[in-house]
Amino acid sequence: MTPKQRKDALKKQKVTQKAIAQKLGVSEMSVSKAIHELIVSDRIYAAVADGIGKPKEQVFNAYYHGPKLRRTSKAFGNTRRK
């Protein structure tokens, strides 16, 4: 699903980003960023998918079925040599 499709599906189900944020104890901005895939949060992805009424793997198909894009903080460590 695209971010627009996710937002439209939530609207159709009468589920707001604010309600998801309050349920999870996160900001509405975090929910919005997850919907637009600007941040990765399995917990928010699951709540959005639950609000839509579909499996999270279907709602965020690119994340769960695409190439793994996650990197650990160690991958971005200081690369300068002393």
Image (cartoon, helix red, strand yellow):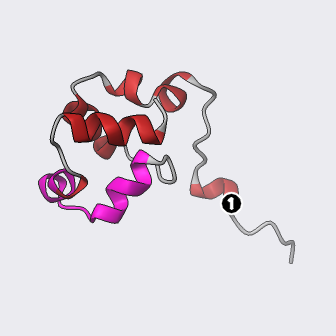
| Residue under the image location 25 percent in, 39 percent down | 10
Badge 1: how crowded within 10 Å, few (<14), some, or many (20+)? few
Residue 43, percent from left and from top: 29, 43
Label 1 sits on what residue type? Phe
Instruction: Determine whether, in the image, residue 70 is placed left or right of residue 25.
Output: right
| Residue under the image location 27 percent in, 22 percent down | 54
Instruction: Determine whether, in the image, residue 16 is placed left or right of residue 8.
Output: left
For the stretch drawn in magenta, what is the main secondary structure?
helix
**Image quadrant of residue 82?**
bottom right
Residue 14, percent from left and from top: 15, 41
- Label 1: state its secondary structure: helix
**Image quadrant of residue 57?**
top left
Between 30 and 12, the one lying in front of the other is: 12
Q: For the magenta stretch, what is the residue range?
A: 19-35
Query: Is 29 drawn above or below residue 62 in the view shown?
Result: below
Residue 20, percent from left and from top: 19, 50
Q: Is residue 24 magenta?
A: yes
Residue 66, percent from left and from top: 59, 25
Residue located farthest toward the bottom when viewing the structure as drawn? 82
Between 31 and 82, the one lying in front of the other is: 31
Number of marks: 1
| Residue under the image location 35 percent in, 60 percent down | 30
Between 32 and 24, the one lying in front of the other is: 32
Residue located farthest toward the right when viewing the structure as drawn? 81
Instruction: Determine whether, in the image, residue 9 is placed left or right of residue 38.
Output: left
Q: Is residue 12 magenta?
A: no
| Residue under the image location 49 percent in, 46 percent down | 37
Which residue is disc 1 drawn over?
76
